[in-house]
Image: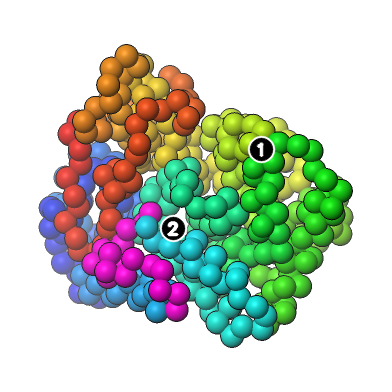
Amino acid sequence: MKLARIRADLLQVGTPVPFDIYTSAGRLLLRRGHPVETELQLERLLQVGLYDPDYAQAHAARAIGRSDRVVAEFSRLPSQQVRNRVSIFETLVSAAQALDDLRSLEPPAAQFEPGIRSTAATIRECCSLDSDAALAQLLLSESLRYSLRHSTNVAILTSLLLSRLRHDPARAESAIAASLTMNLSIFDLQDTLHRQQEPLASDQRTALALHPGQSAKVLRDFGIQDPVWLQAVEQHHEARDGSGYPAGLKEAAICMEAQVVSLVDRYCVLVSQRAYRPALSPRRAIKELNEHAAKAIEPVLIGALIASVGLFPPGAYVRLANGETAIVVRRLLDPKHPVVYALHQDTTAPYETPRKRLTGSQRDYEIVADVKPETVRVKIDPAVLWPPSAVGDTPPANPPA
């Protein structure tokens, strides 16, 4: 490994680093994907930090190659955009659209399993390149039908949670594939229920009760033999206390991957708006899970979810002490003080350009409340707040503070 000094234009406060940073002795200073927290840390990294440019370029090439495989197979990904730099938002939306193409196939289709695995790998790579942008996609994606959006969101958060737990990479990929396909037998029903305000009909209840086993059956019809993938799908509605379905399994009989998918599924449902109820704020959703899911899910997994999402996840809207409405863009080590961008004052027109606020820097910028997304008067352009990134690119300038 040949290490080189880091150019100043490659690092920026509040932005994830695009490569691992080492000391001259080879000790890891900052892992790829973690943000630079302060100006002092930035100065220190530029003074003593080194990186491997050959590895960085190779890693970027792998990321682009994975995305291009999805392009070649489904002709949906924004190929020119992906080749030049990785747009997390566009790539994740395109991954969801690829999932839509895959689910329309009839068994046994040879391209189904490699297609799902490529989609899972793309999601993992997006989460690795910029976990904050991936989390923001979870809260801000509105252009997709609910069933696709939900499956993709569960896959994103499954990837992030298992990465935090340093889970075996092969099993993690199988769990992400399970997240994408856990509802394979009820995609259309999900979209109907998302719009439905009336109580469930008896046939709908039956379909929901049977869908873990039915979805696994469809996967087997496609030739899927991966036991982790199949088990996670079959068990993703089981509960540690035996109250789940379809088999009423308990404790160790439920695989860890199924518990992760189950927990993340619950969270994503809570933060999504339905026809019969508004979305919960991320903080409220976490509180609900803490209070009601502990008997069903291993508490250590709930803790890992909280750590993965944070108190104020990217994409969440908040009100600052000075009256500004802002959107969370980057998490920092202090979970109470993320980087946000102010969008408007309560009584003024939206700012022409979002204004960066470091919430821990002064009292006026302290977060005082959550804000319901439907009350925000500004349409967000993700490309401004989470610029497309590629290893070696010069980070785009932040909007003015």
Location of residue 359 in the rendering, given as x and y in whole percent from the top left corner: 33, 27
- Is residue 229 shown left or right of residue 133? right
Q: Is residue 313 visible?
A: yes
The segment highlighted magenta reads 73-89
- Residue depicted at 65% across the width and 78% down the height: 106
Residue in the image at 74% along x and 69% along y: 216
Helix, strand or loop status at disc 1:
helix
Q: Is residue 63 left or right of residue 188?
A: left
Q: What's the residue type where badge 1 is placed?
A: Leu
* Image position, residue 314 (x, y; %): 41, 41
Q: Is residue 340 toward the left or the right of residue 263 in the image?
A: left
Judge whether residue 294 is colored magenta: no
From the viewer's side, name the closer residue of 320 and 9. 320
Q: In this view, does 127 lie above or below 200?
A: below
Three-letter code, disc 2: Val
Queried whether the magenta region covers residue 74, the answer comes back as: yes
Mark yes or no: residue 31 visible. Answer: no
Q: To which residue does mark 2 refer? A: 93
Q: How many labels does the image show?
A: 2
Rate crowding at label 2 as few (under 14), some (14 to 19) or many (20 or more) other CA atoms within 10 Å. Answer: many
Q: Which quadrant, please, contains the N terminus?
A: bottom left
Q: Name the residue under label 1.
A: 289
Quarter of the image for residue 318 reads top left
Q: Callout 1 environment at 10 Å: few (<14), some (14 to 19), or many (20+)?
A: some
Q: Which of 231 and 196 is in front in this view?
A: 196
Query: Which of the two discs, 1 and 2, labels the residue nearer the N terminus?
Result: 2
